[in-house]
Image (cartoon, coloured by chain):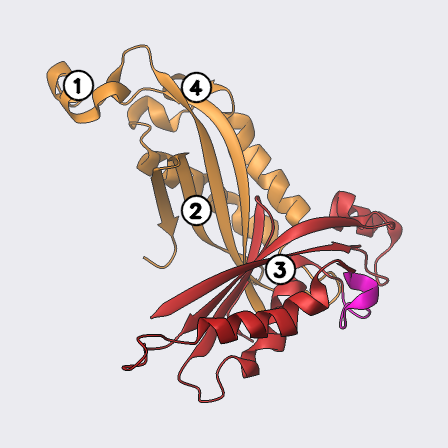
């Protein structure tokens, strides 16, 4: 069974790679390559897989999940310039792909120490027209 | 790292649901208002779900500029502001239901996909079409 929770944060980013030429950056990232940055209201959907506890009827304590999301993701990402203020985006481009992978890495081992429930997917919507889902696959 | 990326596009078009294999009465009974001889239209939304590995330099699972270009060329330009029955070849013989429209979009993209993105590049995993918010059809490579 899968349960998912949705949270939002707002952040700015600059999509440019130092390994690409000016022309390549413009071609690959389009308007998102603006060196002064721009922002989005990101929507994050975190899906948790597991079976409901026979006593509580819950896969996971959702209050606890909310706290984990606040502590591990929102307090780190919300109202930040990702390139400057959130590791690893001093090294890698903060595309929505890399944001989904980073959020997975921040959350995975904290979801449930008893391992009854596990992180199934992280879906990050950058706009209404674009989202990425990461399921921990290599 | 393998991720799934979804990109959404919109186009507006008109159509009429009418099968030449059925009688007028059967067409009216089956398709209801959608059988109106004058046609009608929708704001269609198309979602392309792509599975790919994230490039270590660009941080992208697919070249979005190339995907947008492909969608424009294969779907949006041929379908936008068109009468699907009259102006899209596939629908001269097939009824332009959401099912057939999804299959046609899937076919158009797959015909040129490997040439554009390479055999080891990102894969088109699913095409979804919203005819209205309540009427959605999906074609995927895993069903």
Same subunit, labels 3 and 4: the answer reads: yes
Give me the residue at 50% from left, 70% from top: A135
> Badge 4, how many Cα within 10 Å: few under 14, some, many 20+?
few
Residue B127: numbered disc:
2
Mark 1 or mark 4: whose residue is earlier in sequence? 1
Same subunit, labels 1 and 2: the answer reads: yes
Which residue position holds label 4?
B87
- Cα gap from disc 1 to disc 2, whole angstroms: 29 Å
Horizontal relation, residue B87 to residue B117: left or right: left
Which residue occupies the foreground of this view, A126 or B60? A126
Residue B61: numbered disc:
3
Give me the residue at 44% from left, 89% from top: A114
- Cα gap from disc 2 to disc 3, whole angstroms: 17 Å
Residue B95 seen by the camera: yes
Same subunit, labels 1 and 4: the answer reads: yes
Which residue position holds label 1?
B28
Mark 1 or mark 2: whose residue is earlier in sequence? 1
How far across and down, in percent of the image, does residue A84 sit?
84, 65
Tell me whether circle 1 and circle 2 mark residues in contact (CB < 8 Å).
no
- Cα gap from disc 1 to disc 4, whole angstroms: 23 Å
How far across and down, in percent of the image, does residue A11 sit?
73, 56
Horizontal relation, residue B93 to residue B32: left or right: right
Q: The red chain is which one?
A: A
- Cα gap from disc 2 to disc 4, whole angstroms: 22 Å
Q: Colour of chain B?
A: orange
Residue A102 seen by the camera: no
The chain carrying label 1 is B
The chain carrying label 4 is B
Quadrant of image for the C terminus of chain A: bottom right
């Amino acid at each position: 069974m899968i349960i998912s929770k949705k949270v939002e944060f707002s952040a700015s980013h600059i999509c440019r790679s130092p390994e690409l030429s000016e022309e390549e950056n413009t071609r690959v990232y389009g308007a998102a390559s603006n060196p002064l940055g721009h922002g989005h209201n990101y929507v994050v959907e975190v899906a948790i897989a597991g079976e409901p506890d026979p006593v509580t009827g819950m896969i996971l304590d959702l209050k606890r999940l909310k706290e984990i999301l606040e502590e591990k993701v929102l307090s780190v990402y919300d109202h930040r310039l990702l390139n400057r203020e959130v590791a690893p985006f001093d090294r890698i481009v903060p595309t929505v792909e890399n944001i989904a992978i980073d959020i997975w890495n921040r959350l995975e081992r904290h979801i449930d120490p008893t391992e009854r429930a596990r992180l199934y997917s992280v879906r990050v919507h950058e706009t209404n027209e674009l989202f990425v889902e990461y399921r921990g696959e290599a | 790292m393998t991720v799934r990326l979804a990109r959404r596009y919109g186009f507006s078009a008109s159509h009429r649901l009418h099968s030449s294999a059925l009688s007028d009465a059967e067409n009216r009974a089956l398709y209801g208002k959608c059988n109106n001889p004058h046609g009608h239209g929708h704001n269609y939304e198309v979602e392309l779900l792509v599975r790919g590995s994230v490039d270590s330099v660009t941080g992208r699972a697919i070249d979005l500029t190339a995907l947008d270009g492909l969608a424009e060329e294969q779907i949006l330009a041929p379908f936008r502001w068109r009468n699907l029955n009259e102006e899209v070849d596939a629908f001269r013989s097939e009824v332009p239901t959401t099912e057939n429209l999804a299959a046609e979009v899937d076919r158009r993209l797959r015909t040129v996909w490997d040439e554009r993105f390479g055999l080891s590049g990102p894969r088109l995993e699913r095409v979804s079409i919203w005819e209205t918010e309540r009427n959605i059809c999906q074609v995927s490579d895993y069903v």
